[in-house]
């Protein structure tokens, strides 16, 4: 595997396509919601989790306090959790899921694709 040059690494730091995932997504005929969590709130960070995926309620929560790159990787991780639950009957080992999400995240970043959770505008 070729190591990225400094120039290529810098290019990866700026995503060309930012895809807002707050609107949620469809998987296996179900709608999954996606919500942001913040590290200064109790919850995810307390358990050292950067995200959670509840296959029962179809809710994904992402800790966004660690920056846009981490948010994108966590989102990829959590959708793989959902895919594993629905299509692999949870039989993928978690350590393998972690490696797959890391690899997928690297491919997306190199393509300039990043998953973001935009803050909701305050309602008047
Ligand atoms: Zn996980």
Image (cartoon, rainbow, N blue to C red):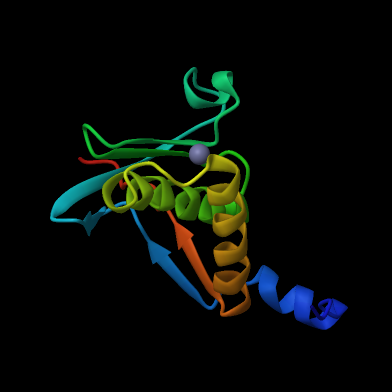
User: What residue is shown at x 57% (from left), y 63% (from top)?
Assistant: 105
Rendering coords of residue 15 (x, y %): 57, 72
Left or right: 67 in relation to 57? right
Q: Which quadrant is home to the N terminus?
A: bottom right
Left or right: 33 in relation to 116? left
Q: How many marks?
A: 0
Rendering coords of residue 26 (x, y %): 21, 57
Q: Nearer the viewer, residue 118 or 25?
A: 25
User: What residue is shown at x 55% (from left), y 30% (from top)?
Assistant: 49
Question: Quadrant of residue 108 in the image?
Answer: bottom right
Rendering coords of residue 86 (x, y %): 27, 48
Question: Quadrant of residue 33 in the image?
Answer: top left
Left or right: 47 in relation to 34? right
Q: Which quadrant is home to the C terminus?
A: top left
User: What residue is shown at x 77% (from left), y 74% (from top)?
Assistant: 9
Left or right: 86 in relation to 13? left
Rendering coords of residue 16 (x, y %): 53, 78
Q: Nearer the viewer, residue 30 or 24?
A: 30
For residue 95, above or below residue 16 = above
């Amino acid at each position: 595997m070729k190591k990225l040059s400094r120039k290529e690494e810098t290019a990866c730091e700026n995503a060309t396509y930012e895809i807002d995932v707050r609107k949620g997504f469809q998987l296996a005929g179900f709608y999954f919601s996606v919500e942001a969590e913040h590290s200064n709130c109790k919850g995810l960070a307390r358990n050292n989790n950067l995200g959670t995926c509840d296959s029962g309620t179809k809710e994904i929560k992402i800790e966004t306090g660690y920056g846009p790159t981490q948010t994108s990787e966590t989102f990829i991780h959590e959708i793989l959790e959902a895919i594993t639950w629905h299509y692999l009957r949870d039989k993928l080992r978690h350590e393998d899921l972690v490696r797959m999400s890391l690899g997928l995240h690297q491919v997306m970043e190199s393509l300039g694709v990043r998953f973001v959770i935009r803050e909701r505008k305050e309602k008047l």
